[in-house]
Amino acid sequence: MEAKVKWHANNTFIGHSGSGHSVVFDGNKEGSCAPSPMEMVLMAAGACSSVDVVSILKKSRQQVVDCEVKLSGERAETIPKVFTKIHLHFEVTGFNLNEKQVERAVQLSADKYCSVSIMLSGSVTVTHSYSVKASELSPTAE
């Protein structure tokens, strides 16, 4: 895997992935136009885990219609201001969702599949929780 990050202006940088995608990073404390690198790390943990949770639930034949993960991170007071704690709370919405299946999906992501949060857990306390919500929409055939 390869990527590059190029300085654009001020404290703004553009990252280019080996797969041909680009993303803007902003290190400005005020007037920023994009997420900071640390915000990107936090969102990367949420995105990685969400991919796992949705995939596992679909493979378990659960009728998932939405999955949102709310992330919170605590950072060290001194430089380097690394994350010390990260919490991921999944809000999973669907039809007749089996709560045990949701719990299993979150746990499998946390323990086995999510490369980002597992990598971070070597130096950061990473915790997970979830809630299950019934969808207000009618199920559709796929």
Image (cartoon, helix red, strand yellow):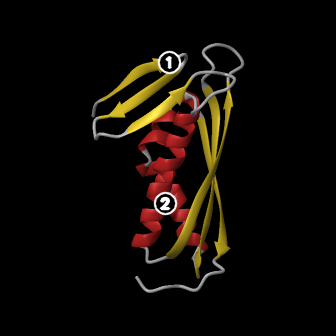
**Could you tell me which quadrant the C terminus lies in?**
bottom left
The reply to whether callout 1 and callout 2 are in contact (CB within 8 Å) is no
- Which mark identifies residue 137? none
Callout 1 environment at 10 Å: few (<14), some (14 to 19), or many (20+)?
few
For badge 1, the amino acid type reads Ala
| Residue lying at 55% horizontally and 18% vertically, measured from the top left | 11
3D distance between C-alphas at marks 1 and 2: 37 Å
Q: Residue at x 57, y 38 (%)?
A: 42
Residue under the point 60% across and 23% down: 82
Lateral position of residue 99 relative to residue 113, left or right: right
Q: Residue at x 58, y 34 (%)?
A: 39
Q: Residues within 10 Å of mark 2 (few under 14, many from 20)?
A: many
Q: Is the residue 106 above or below the residue 98 in the image? A: above
Q: Position of residue 125 (x, y in %)?
A: 61, 36
Query: Which badge, 1 or 2, is on the more N-terminal residue?
Result: 1
The type of residue carrying mark 2 is: Val
Foreground: disc 1 or disc 2? 1
Can the viewer see residue 100? yes
Task: Examine the rendered structure and indicate whether residue 113 appears above or below residue 39.
Answer: below
Callout 1: SS: strand
Q: Residue furthest top?
A: 79
Q: Position of residue 52 (x, y in %)?
A: 44, 57
Q: Nearer the viewer, residue 12 or 91?
A: 12
Count the labels in the image. 2
Counting from the top left corner in percent of width and height, residue 28 is at 62, 21
Residue 4 vertical position relative to residue 100 in the rendered view, above or below: above
The residue tagged 2 is 53
Q: Which residue is mark 1?
A: 9
Q: Quadrant of the N terminus?
A: top left
Is residue 123 visible to the viewer in this orientation of the structure? no
**Residue placed furthest toward the right:** 77
